[in-house]
Amino acid sequence: MQFLNQGLAFGAIAAAIPLIIHLLNRSRFRTVDWGAMHLLESIIRVNHRRFQIEQWILLLIRCLIPALLAMTLARPVLTGAGLLQGDAPVSLVILLDNSYSMDSVSGNGTRFQEAVAEAMQVIRAVPRGSEVSVILTGGRPIPVFDRPITDVDSIVRRLKQLNGGYGASDLPAAMDEAITTLGRMTHARRELMLISDFQPADWKQLTSDGAALLQRRLTSLDVPPALTFLPVGNAITANISADAIDYPRHAIGVEQQLPVRVTIRNHSAVPVENTRVTLQVDGKEADVAQVSLPAAGDTQVFFPVEFSAAGSHVLEVRVAADDGLPSDNRIAAVVTVWDTIPVVLVDGDPSSEPLAGETDFLSVALTPYTFGRMRLTDLVTTRTIPPTAISDEVLRTARVVVLANVSKLEPPQLQLLTDWVIHGGSVLVTSGNRLDINWYNQTLFAAGTGMLPASFGLSRGTADGQTAATHIVAQHFEHATVEFFNEAQNGDLSTAEIRQWYELLPAATTDGTVADTSANNTETGPENTPARPAAIVIARLESGDPLLVERPFGEGTVIQLATAIDDDWSDLPLRPFYVPLMQQIVTTMAARISPPRNIAAGEPAIALLSSDELLPADSSGTSTSAADISAEIPGRTIAVVSPDGSRHTLQTVARGRLQMAQFDRTERPGIYSMSLPTAATIHFVAETDRRESVPQLMSPDELNKLADSLSATVTRSSDDWLELDRLRRHGREIWKYLLSALLIVMFLEVILQQRFARVRL
C-alpha cells in the first residue's frame, strides 16, 4: 500500500492526543478519606470496574478518529505486492482473431468489427511511448506490422482497414508467435491480450501438457507478461456450410465429363428445406440444384461438368442460406484440363512383331480408338523410344515416362531422368526378364534414398505357368489410380492371373512402417533435394506381396509395378479392364501437379514454371527463345490477384532448370490468380477446414478453466480491461472507505458517550 499524500499520513500521530489528555486529567484527582465511605466500598469497586471499561472504549474510539482522519487525507492506494508504474510505457501484444468464424453477425456488426473496436480502444489508452504489436491469427499468425511500433494513430488506421474471413485460427501457434514478439520488446511492463470468439475447436489441439509448456514459456521470459482473454460476439443458433468438393483425380480432357460431388452440412437443430446450391465454372453459373438438409446432418449434391478449353479452371459452389455465418457458404477447387498428355514409353524389350514389344500393349491401351464415356482417345499421346534416347528435349514436353522392362540406364540418362522427376515429372517402372536387379537396388533404390519406391526382392512364380498363379486382392481401393474399380461395372481386378512377379520391399518410414493408403507420409528434406518419404502400397497380391507401390520423389512421383506390363508374366493385357487400368494409372500420374494448386489457407502458392511458360509474346506474335530468356534475366515478374481483389507482384527464382513463383500471403480462403507473361493464368484455391462452422462458443466455465491453465485473466470488454490496467498501474484508492469508517466511528463515539453518561446518572 502506498499514499498519494504521504505527508498527511504522519497525522496519524494525532491518535496519541486523546491518550495524553486522559493521562493529564487523571493526574489532577486527589484521594480524600471519608469515614462513611467504607460502607459503599463494594458498590464503588463494581462501578469503578464498569466505568473503567467504558472509559477505555471511549479512549480507543477517540484515538481512532484522528488516525482515520489522517489516513483518509493521505489517500492510501492498494497496490498488492508490486510497485505502482503509473504512466510508464508498456509493451503490448494483441492477438486479433480474424478467422472466418469472426464474420458471424453479432449485436453491432460482425464479431470481427467488435474485436477491432475493442482493440482500438485498448491501443488508444496505452501510455505515451508504448510499443504495440498486433498479430492476426486467421490462417496462420501474421503481424500487422513487421515490428512493434509506437505510433498509435498508424495502428488504429491500419486496424480500420482490416477484414475478417480468413482461415481457421491456430491459436496455440499464434501464442508462440506472440511470445517470440514479446521477447524482442523492451519495456519493463508487458501485456498480452487475445481478442477472439473463443470457439472450442480452436483450442482442442492444446492439451494439458501443451498448456503447461505454454505457461512455462510465458513465465520464462525476462519480463513475464500479464495475459488477458477478451471474448467477443454472441453464439449463433443456425449455420449451413459447404464442407467439401470432390471429383476424380485423374487427368481430364477438353469436353470430357467430370463428376463433381459437393457436401453441404446443416449445423442447426432444425431441418432446412429448398436450399439453393449453385455451381460456377470460372465465375459463370453452370448448374443449380435445390436440396433439403436434415437437422444436424449433411447431404451431397452431384454436378456433371464439362470444359470447353484446356488450362486452369475454377469450380466454385455457393449455398444461398440466410444464416449467421456467410463465409463458409462457399467452397472452391482448381481443376487442370489437358489438351494432350504426352507419355514417353521407354521400351526395354522392343520387337518388330505386332504386340510382341514390351510397350505394345500399353501403347494401344493409352491410345484406343474409343473408350466409352471417358473418351480419352485424343487426350494421351505416346512416343516409344529406346533407353539411350532419353534426352532433355524428350523430357521437356513429357508428362509421364514409362520404364518398361529396361535393363538399366546409363549415367547421363539417369541424371536427366532424376532431375526431371525431382522437378515434377512422373515415372512408371515395370518389371520384366531384362531387369538388372543389382543396378535397380543399388543405384535406383539406393537404400531408400533414390527414386525407386521399393527394392526388388526374389522372383516369384514362373512365366510359363508351371507354378500356381496369384491374383490381385479384391478390396475397396483408396488410391486415386485404382479407385475407379471400386464400382463393379468398371472391372474386377482380382480376375487377372499373375504368373510371375518380383517381391517388392517398399521404403519404410522413420518408424519402420509402410503406408497402405494414399495418405501423405512424406518427410521434408533440404531445399532442392528429394525428400525421403514413405512408400505407399496401392494394391497387393493374394500372396501378400505388393503389386503397385508409389513414392513421391522431390516434386514428382514414381510408381513401381511388380510384374511385366505386357503378357509375358500375366494375362493383364488380355483382360477388359487393362485399358482403363493403364489409363487411370498414367492419367492420374500426369494430373498430379506438384506443388499442388489446391492448398490449405496459409500455405504458400507455388508454381514451377518452364521457360516456355515465361516467354512473353511480342506484337508480331512471336516469342523470345527459352535460351534467350534464361540468358537475359534469372527471374520474371508475376502478378497475383488475391480473393479480395488486391494485386501483388513477385519475382520468380531459379530452381534447377525451372523458375519458381511463390506467393505466401494465402491466409484468406478463396481463389488466387497468377498471371504469366504468356497471358496464361494459373489458379490456386486456398481453403480451410470447417471446424469453426460449428456455432458453439466456450461457456464461461470453459473459458475460465482455459484461463486458469494459462494463468490468464478474463475480461468481458475493453472497459473492464482498462479498469484492470488502471489498477495495475495506479492501484485502488480506499480513502472513500476510510471516510465512511471515520463517520461511523464519530457517530459511535457520540452514541456511546451519551449511553455511558446516562448509566452513571
Image (spheres, rainbow, N blue to C red):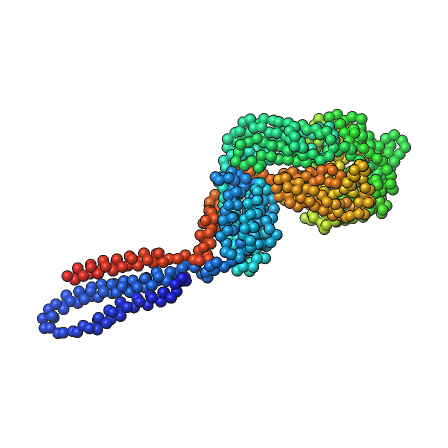
Quadrant location of residue 659? Answer: top right
In the visual, does 697 lie left or right of 356?
Answer: left
Instruction: Establish if 288 lies above or below 230.
Output: above
Is 152 situated above or below 106?
below
Judge from the rendering whether residue 482 lies leftward or rightward of residue 160; answer left or right.
right
Q: Residue at x 49, y 49 (%)?
A: 121
Query: Looking at the rendering, which quadrant does residue 147 occupy?
Result: bottom right
For the residue pair 514 and 452, the one nearer the viewer reads as 452
Q: Quadrant of residue 473?
A: top right
Q: Position of residue 25 (x, y in %)?
A: 22, 70
User: How far from the left and from the top, in percent, is residue 564?
Assistant: 81, 36
Q: Residue at x 24, y 71 (%)?
A: 23
The image position of residue 95, as x and y in percent, is: 55, 49
**Percent from the top left, x then y, of residue 439?**
83, 46
Image quadrant occupied by the C terminus: bottom left
The residue positioned farthest toward the front in the image shown: 619
Residue closest to the eye, 11 or 475: 11
Q: Is residue 681 visible?
A: yes
Residue at (12, 70) in percent of width and height: 38
Residue extending farthest left: 36
In the rendered structure, the answer to whether residue 209 lies left or right of residue 651 reads: left
Dividing the image into 4 quarters, which one contains the N terminus? Answer: bottom left
Residue 186's place in the image compared with 109, above or below, is below
Which of these two is toward me, 286 or 714?
Answer: 286
Q: Tell me if I can see residue 208 in this picture.
A: no
Q: How many marks?
A: 0
